[in-house]
Amino acid sequence: MVTGCSSGIGRAAAEMLRDRGWRVVPSARKDEDMDALRCAGFEPVHIELTDADSVATGFEKAQAVCGGDLGAVVNNAGYGQPGALEDIPRTTLAWQFEVNVIGMQHLTNLCIPVFRAQGYGRIVNVSSVLGRITMPFMGAYCASKYAMEALSDALRVELHGSGIAVSIIEPGPINTDFGKNSSEKLRALDEVASIFGNHYETQARCLDDRKGRKDPYMRPPSAAAAKIVKALESRRPASRYKVTLPAYAGAFIRRFAPDSFLDMMFVQLWKKRAGE
């Protein structure tokens, strides 16, 4: 079962796994995305991660498609809420965690009893390099990915000896609609009288251009999908798989660089983007 398969990493993973002989049950939220997955030959299930009933129903349907033999779940669905933390309302922050953390863990918890009964199972959580290193104006998203990493680390130990493996995928820049979707959410903050208003507009334009611009460090969705396949098929899967050079660099910097260095690095980046 792979969540968030309307496009990007989820869609690439679903197609790559199917090509390798897996029976894949992808999930999506929108009707048009469900139709597109059906046209591609999948039997998708509808899951809205913020709705507990939808998660439970989607899991039951996925089990039915698999004939009760679900062997792995890839928690890929999620989104990034940009903006300065002081400008993000409580409801918006809660929604970020409902999608990226709470709904993800709910679905995982439904899978675990099935995996325990079988004596095997794989849980693959798609996090981000921003689950290891925090970027300003992406604090809500980073916090949700830090939370995913913490839950994954705890779960990996709690499931020791059960035959269930837990792996984390940490992509850096991937050529998906993530930037476009984030820019839409950033522009929604225009209603807020923020001192960062000018920066938001500049950042929104950068996010709009992210998918189309040439970036030597950006990789296609298939790069992340290949690491998902590796986590699912390895006899001894690693706890973490990094994707793209920035993901390796971010983890290294976070481990060895002092906070003051990171703070100054991001201040300079912010000023450069703002044209200061």
Image (cartoon, rainbow, N blue to C red):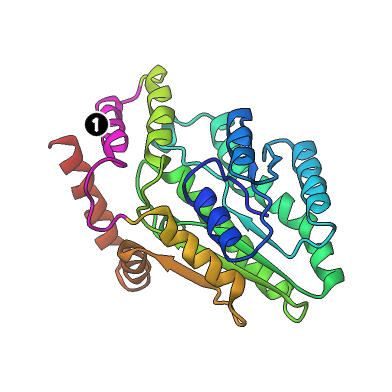
**Kind of element beneath mark 1:** helix
Residue under numbered circle 1: 202
Q: Residue 242 at what x, y percent from top left?
A: 43, 67
Observer-nearest of 226 and 165: 226
Camera-side residue of 8 and 36:
36
Q: Position of residue 70 (x, y in %)?
A: 77, 61
Q: Residue at x 63, y 53 (%)?
A: 2
The residue lying at 53 percent from left, 72 percent from top is: 230
Tell me the quadrant of the picture where the N terminus can be found: bottom right
Relative placement, left or right, of 52 versus 142 is right
Which stretch is magenta?
Answer: 194-218
The C terminus - image quarter = top left
Q: Is residue 124 left or right of residue 269?
A: right
Q: Is residue 192 above or below residue 199?
A: above
Residue 106 makes an appearance in the image: yes
Q: Is 212 part of what is drawn in magenta? A: yes
The kind of residue on which mark 1 rests is Thr
